[in-house]
Amino acid sequence: MATLKDAAARKPVLATIRLIVPAGAARPAPPVGPALGFYRLNLMAFCKDFNARTQKYKADTPMQVTLTAYKDSTFEFVVKSPSVSWFLKKAAGIETANSRPGHSNVSSLTLRHVYEIAKLKQADPFCKHMSLEALCKSIIGTANSMGIAIVKDL
Amino acid sequence: MLPSLVRAGSAPLRRVVSTFSSTRAVSPRVPYAISSGGNLSLPFNAQPSPSRDGSSGPAGAARRGMGFCARAVDVGDEAASSSAAAGSDLSAPYLSVRIRCRRHDVEALSEALLCFGASSVTVDDIADAENLDEISITSLYADGEDVDSSVSSAASSAGLNYSPVYETSVGKQCDWVANVQETYEPTEVADGLWVVPKWRTPPDPEATNIIIDPGLAFGMGEHPTTKLCLLFLREVIKGGERVLDYGTGTGVLGIAALKMGATQSTGIDIDPQAITSASENLLLNGLHSNQMPVYLVPANAQPSCFPSAIDKSEDHHSTNYLDLKLSRGTYDVVAANILLNPLLELVEDIVGYAKPGGIIAVSGILEEQVSKIKEVYSRYLDRILVSEMDGWACLRGTRRV
């Protein structure tokens, strides 16, 4: 979180807002509307900006956005790729994670999947400092908590 | 194997945007900290969908209940407020959950809440709460979500060894709409050209004032792309032109063109909110709907797709697609302020509306996206010029004969 902390040191921060917004499809409706509207942030500017910036992603991919609202009504935002759990669900072709992880497994993925997800995640601003191995371990941990088994080969 | 969903760039996407909060109605100084290092030419995958057709937004009926509703209501009033139509209009409720947790759990809990169904998680500034061990975070949920199970799943996933205390209340959409409305100020786009929110008095009554009530549509005059397009119009409108506002939003560009001397503007958009907003705004500016017909068009707007049946809308306007179809190739000026992908996909549609030799301007693109637009549009346009403002760009050209 180095970059956001720096930002906070420069200007007084009012709030930090986290949202998931589909790429290219931010609209002034929930979740964006109420979350940003509460702090009187310029919704339309955010939507236009976010949509323009996420044109390079497949439409409707759920991007993780972290907004820092400053006390002077300006704001800054950072866009990250979807959560690891989303990638895992996509890869495994499932809708919801297992509600009883450890007791029954929903599905399986291979180490190759984990590696590919790690590669994508490594490009994220906050994961750059992590080694691929560390990322993979973290992803495997998430997979386990979702009841997805990681096997060598399918 | 792993579906190629995302090709993440090598740099964080980061932007500083200043909202219009000062009372000085001068074009705001917008410091855009561009930190897009490296090569952001990323492969784009699959079918792009131009801005959503509002199917999951407050769309559906083009109603815009703009009453200034009360603020977030307590759970006790829930019965009354949730009887309003769910989801698709401005009085639809959402759930606001205030959760208390320990400072050092905030990060993990916030992430977890988002994974377990929260629409957003907001943390009020931590620095203010220096001396407190416990802080509050606010999480918003769509109406009908199971907040209890979401919070408990999130708490255990985040590794909390306690059950956070929380309190749910119901918020109404018009709360935040009203909030944001209040922030808009008149904007002087150029000398003698202002865009003024409906509830404010024009600072210069002698100037060309475009009155806008934004609602949930885009185009209040303060965004660089709107300004670039308005400046473009100012340059090319001499009087008597027929103008097409492709992706009209609030109708600001179409209305401006009329005020600058165009004979007729036509506004089209895929979002019903835009149609409502533009229709109301043209009346606010003393214009007649004959001067500016507005059409709701399907999201995959190819001319052949227009239904031959007429008039799907309810109120303001006639959606006589035949008129729109017939107007192809007749416009002197076409302005399209949308987004990169729709501009690329719909190039033939956009250019096709202009008469040969007509002038076309496209915007809603970042400076880094100009080359892609130029590559595609130079097949159809001559005399291409690019103008830029604060990291945004507008490309114009004349339709090849």
Image (cartoon, coloured by chain):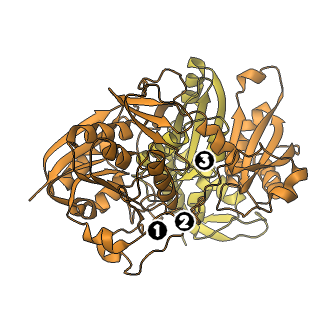
Tell me if label 2 and label 1 are in contact, CB under 8 Å.
yes
Please name the residue that numbered disc 3 is placed on.
A32
Please name the residue that numbered disc 2 is placed on.
A91
Between B123 and B220, which is closer to the camera in this rendering?
B220
- Determine which quarter of the picture holds residue A106: bottom right
**In the rendered structure, which disc, 3 or 2, sits on the residue that comes first in sequence?**
3
Q: Position of residue B308 (x, y in %)?
A: 37, 81
Secondary structure found at label 3: helix
Tell me if label 1 and label 3 are in contact, CB under 8 Å.
no
Whether residue B250 appears in this view of the structure is no
For disc 2, the neighbor class at 10 Å (few under 14, some 14 to 19, many from 20) is some
Q: Amino acid at mark 1?
A: Met
Image mark count: 3
* Residue at 62 percent of width and 47 percent of height: A33
Q: Position of residue B203 (x, y in %)?
A: 46, 25
Q: Chain of mark 2?
A: A
* Residue at 80 percent of width and 59 percent of height: B82
Between B285 and B58, which is closer to the camera in this rendering?
B285
